Amino acid sequence: MLPSVKADPYAWPFDGRWSVADTALIVIDMQTDFLKPGGYCATMGLDVDLTASSIAPARRALARMRELGFPIIHTREGHRPDLSDLNANKRWRSARIGAEIGTPGPCGLLLTRGEPGWDIVPEVAPAPGEIVIDKPGKGAFHATDLEAILQRRGIRNLVFAGVTSDCCVHTTMTNANDKGYECLLLADASAALETRNHAMIVAITAKRGGQFGAVAAADDLLAALAPAKAPAESSR
Amino acid sequence: MRDGAKAMIGQVEGIYRWPCDGPWVAASAALVVVDMQRDHLDPDGWFALTGGDAAALRRIVPACAEAIALARTAGLGIVYTVEAHREDLDDLPANKLWRTQRLGRAVGAQGPLGRHLVRGEAGAAVVSALAPRAGEPVIVKAGKSGFIATDLDHILRRNGIRNLVFAGVTTDGAVQCTLRDANDRGYECLLLEDATASDVAAHHDDQIHTLSLAGGHYGSIAKVAALAAALSPEAVA
C-alpha cells in the first residue's frame, strides 16, 4: 500500500487505495506547439515561457512513476494531414488569429500530426511501450480510445500533468471525474498561457470539497512515492 | 423538437460575431439551460445546504427566463439539463458520494426537497419560473457535463442542431463542462454571460476570461440583449 498524497482539499486518493495496478499518470499535450518558440501557441503570440515552466516538474513526476512501473499515458492534440477531423469552427477561429491549423509555421504545419511542432518535447518524450493518445479536440476522451484503454487496464485513479491547465488538462480531468475516475492535478507540472487562468483552475478544482478531484505539487506525489521500490527489471 | 423557423437570422454581437459562419436559422440552433433546478437554486436545496451561495445563482433566473422566451418566440430548440442520480444510486461514482458526505449532505440523503440530487424528487425539478414545456427535452445527467453518459448529443444531432446557446449554472461547473464538450463535438457555441452565474463571482469572471482566450477558442460570448437584437422581428430577414 502506498501512502496517500498530501493534497488539497483532501489526502489523495479519497479512499486511500492506489497502486501501480490501478493508477496512471496522464501527461497532456506536452508538444512543441504549446511549449516552444515557433509552435502553434507562440505563433498566436502567446507566452510559452509560462507553459514551459511545467516541463521540469512534469519530468520529475514522469521519471519516478515510470521507474516504479505505473502506466504512463501521453496525449497529443493534432489533426490528420487531410484535416478531415478538424471542425469547421476550430479552423475558422485559428485562421482568425493568424495561426490557421494545417498551414505552414516555423515548426511545420500547425497542429498537424507528423509535423515537428506536434512532437512531444524531448524532456518528457514517451518511452517505448507507453501509451500515446492522438486527439482532435481538447478533451482526450472525445474521439479516442482512452476510455477503452483505461478500462482494459483496470485503471481507476489518474494523476494529471501537462498543458494547458485551463484547456485540455481541465477538459480531460473534468470528463474523467464525471466518469468516476479519482483525479489528482499536479499543479506545478501543469500550466496555462496566463497565470490568472492557471490559478482559477486550481481554485475551482479544489472548490466545494474537490468538485473535480484534488490538487498537489509534483513533490507531494514524489514524497508519497519515496518509500516505494522499483520492480526488478525482469518483472516489468 | 418544433416546427420550421427558416428565416435567416443575423449574427449575434459578441466577442466574435456568432455563429462564425454567418446568418443562421432558428431550426439549426438550441438554447441549453443548464441545471436551473431547485437543488441548486432553492434556499432549502442541496447547494445552499452544503454552503453554496444559492442566492447568487437565483439572480440569473430573470435573464434565463428572457432567453427562454426569446428562443421560444423565434423557434429555437430548448434543451434543459438537470443533475440527478438514479434512485438506487447505481450511477453515482464512489468518490462523488464520499465528497458529498464530507460536505455534510450526501447524494441520496433526505433533505427538505426530497432526496438530494435524485431523479424525480422535488429538488431535481427545474425551477417553476423556467419550467420546460412539452417538446423541450430534459437531459438528466449524473456528472457535470451534459454529454457524459446521456443522450444529449443524440438528440441534438437527430434534430439537426449545430449551434448551441448556453444559459444556467454554474459557469465554472456544469456550464463550462458541457460547453467544452459541445465544442469538441463540433457545435458552434455561444455563452450568454449574463444568463450564467457562479456562487463565487470571481470564478464566473475568470471562467469567462479563460473561454475568451485566443479570440474565443470554445465559441463566442455575448449578453442576452445581443441575442434579443439578432432575434428581433426587424432584424430577421
Image (spheres, coloured by chain):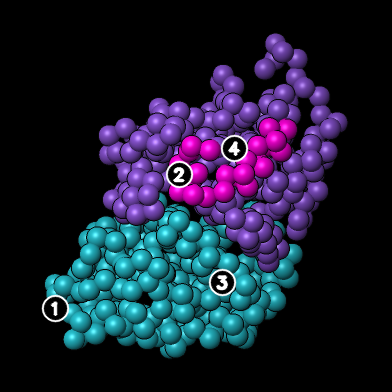
Chain colours: A purple, B cyan
In this rendering, which labeled residue sits more in front, label 1 or label 4? 1
The residue carrying mark 4 is A27
Of callouts 4 and 2, which one flags the residue occurring earlier in the amino acid sequence?
4
Q: Chain of mark 2?
A: A
Q: Residues within 10 Å of mark 3 (few under 14, many from 20)?
A: many
Q: Is residue A108 above or below residue B22?
A: above
The residue under the point 75% across, 58% down is A9
Dot 1: element:
loop
Amino acid of disc 4: Val
Asked whether, in this view, residue B109 is left or right of residue B168, the answer is right
Of callouts 3 and 1, which one flags the residue occurring earlier in the amino acid sequence?
3
Instruction: Give the farthest residue toward the right.
Output: A227
Dot 2: element:
helix
Amino acid of disc 3: His
The residue carrying mark 2 is A43
Q: Chain of mark 1?
A: B
Q: Is residue B80 above or below residue B229?
A: above
The reply to whether callout 3 and callout 1 are in contact (CB within 8 Å) is no
On the image, the x and y values in percent for residue A208 come to 68, 66
Callouts 1 and 2 on one subunit: no
The residue carrying mark 3 is B204
